[in-house]
Amino acid sequence: MATTFAEYKAYITPDVLPCPDPIVERELISTLIDFCKLTHCLTKDFNVELDSDDIDSEYQDSIDISLSEYFTDYRPVAVIAINIDGVDYVPEYKEVLNTIDAWDSSLCPDNVKFFFFLNNTTLRLYDMATGDTNLYLRIAVKPIRAITEVQDEFLFEDHIDTIAAGVKFRILKMPGKVWSDQNASKQNWIDWRRGVTKARANQDRGHTKNPQTVYPVSFGGLD
């Protein structure tokens, strides 16, 4: 069930009046994107049936996966988990620009799979074997800027206070506006950062009390 912008703005607009509605929505979208990038809270899990014919043996035994087949209103942020035929691998970002003749000297360790995003819709994995048949992926994603509502209701139910604080921080810090309020902006920044830190810690624990061994690596290798 999707959550409308109006539902989010009920927690934001009264505190930033008379900020125009288009600015509130613009900053809301930016904050949602930043929240997903920083917390990895929004993930997509899917299986890919592998075909040996898809492997490029002259390009580090790589295979390209079209993410648009699995989600369209999101862009990738990080690879959280890789499992090939029941074996877990640690995803490690490596941007390879061409064929590397000496690739044999830099093969992945046994428990690592190198990857990078060719663009916003294509994931490339290296050192794939012709015998690989089933690939499981968990990818952290963020919404695209063209959204008109938020498809993932839990973001609203679980994180509205943090997201609202992030939006208010952005709006209230704008200099020279009728709605500018640097003191309130500072407090909202503190609330935003605390909420993001808590959400990321909870995500890394897998929403349990115990830490999990996961290795999220962001798009471009940066958080």
Image: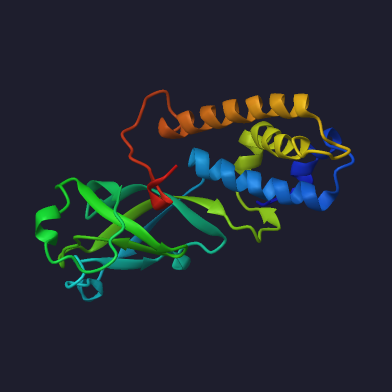
Instruction: Tell me how the rendering is colored.
Output: rainbow
Mark yes or no: residue 72 visible.
Answer: yes
Foreground of the two, 55 or 87: 55
User: Residue at 24% across / 47% down in the picture?
Assistant: 89
User: Residue at 38% across / 48% down in the picture?
Assistant: 221
Mark yes or no: residue 41 visible.
Answer: no
Tally of numbered discs: 0
Q: In the drawing, does residue 47 fall left or right of residue 77?
A: left
Foreground of the two, 171 or 127: 171
Q: In the drawing, does residue 173 fall left or right of residue 69?
A: right
Foreground of the two, 28 or 203: 28
Q: Position of residue 71 (x, y in %)?
A: 50, 62
Q: Quadrant of the C terminus?
A: top left
Q: In the drawing, does residue 162 fall left or right of residue 64?
A: right
Q: Residue furthest front?
A: 176
User: Residue at 71% across / 46% down in the picture?
Assistant: 27
Q: Position of residue 206 (x, y in %)?
A: 42, 34
Quarter of the figure with residue 217: top left
Q: Position of residue 39 (x, y in %)?
A: 50, 38
Q: Is residue 89 above or below residue 64?
A: above
Q: Position of residue 20 (x, y in %)?
A: 86, 48
User: Residue at 25% across / 74% down in the picture?
Assistant: 54
